[in-house]
Amino acid sequence: MDAFKERVTNYWTKRAEDFAALRIRELRSPLRSYWWAEMAKHFPMGRNLRILDLGTGTGFFTFLLTEKGNRVTGIDLTEKMISEAKETAEYLGIPAEFYVMDAEHPDFEDESFDVLVTRNLTWVLPNLAETYRSWYRLLVPGGVLINFDADYCHAAPQKDLPENHAHKNIPQELNEENDAITHVMKDKQGIRPEWDFGLLKDAGFERITIDTGVWRRIYREKNEFYNPVPIFCIAAYKPYV
């Protein structure tokens, strides 16, 4: 693992336990249905889809999609995150597979999945062009990548967060480390999501759509889950041969 990725995993190792508790509460909140409504717009027909949750964290998308009748695998580079995801799966009684794995180079056979999903991951991947090509090979023809993210590297400082917001309890040293990681990534990324559109097209994806309104539909209230940086959704399909 290179030094930057080790730095990122060290950061998330320190946040994993509190992050897992937050995601359990989110699963029990109205946001659960909001997230599914946004993903369902792009899903292939039918159930029992093979889905890869990239950068799963503590498993939020994996749990949500497994309960919809799909075969979901979650991967994350941070071992502590995967440990928390497995514990949460047992606690919730949800069967799911989790692996410690680098999302830039997932170790699966070509055309292993119908759907790839990811949330707040691609902004911190140093080699995004290469990553999108790697993800392209994992999809079956007609498969779709659904990427929820935001232009964190070029966002204004966060202000006016509610008092119960999760970020209010993050120690100052971790906030400073997050700022430092963001500063490193800023030099590696263009303005998003326009930059992503070009990268995905170069990787071979077609029918690429960008939805910048998803942020307001998911974060309808300023509560502990609220994301002050406007997220977008990119859906990109692998063409049929």
Image (spheres, helix red, strand yellow):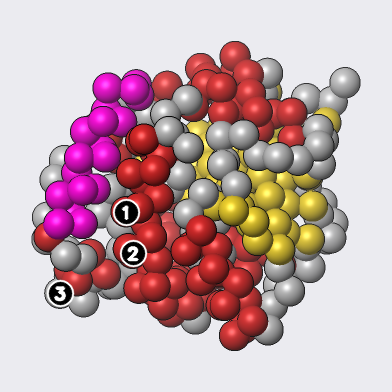
Q: Which residue is mark 3?
A: 163
**Residue appearing at x 40%, y 50% in the figure:** 9
Q: Nearer the viewer, mark 1 or mark 3?
A: 1
Label 3 and label 2: CA atoms lie apart by 19 Å
Circle 3/circle 2 CB separation < 8 Å: no
Q: Is residue 157 visible?
A: yes
Q: Which residue is mark 2?
A: 15
168 or 161: nearer the viewer: 168
236 or 20: nearer the viewer: 20
144 or 37: nearer the viewer: 144
Q: Residues within 10 Å of mark 3 (few under 14, many from 20)?
A: few
* Identity, as a three-letter code, of the amino acid under mark 3: Glu
**Residue appearing at x 74%, y 28% in the figure:** 137
Circle 1/circle 2 CB separation < 8 Å: yes
Label 1 and label 3: CA atoms lie apart by 23 Å
Label 1 and label 2: CA atoms lie apart by 7 Å
Instruction: Look at the image and give the residue range highlighted in magenta.
Output: 173-190
Q: Nearer the viewer, mark 3 or mark 2?
A: 2
Give the quarter of the figure containing the C terminus: top right
Decide if residue 78 is on the left or right side of residue 11: right
* Identity, as a three-letter code, of the amino acid under mark 2: Arg
Residue 26, given in percent of the width and then of the height, sits at 44, 74
Look at the numbered disc 2 and give the secondary structure of its residue.
helix
Instruction: Reply above or below: 23 against 103.
Output: below
Q: Earlier in the sequence, mark 1 or mark 3?
A: 1
Look at the numbered disc 1 and give the secondary structure of its residue.
helix
* Identity, as a three-letter code, of the amino acid under mark 1: Tyr
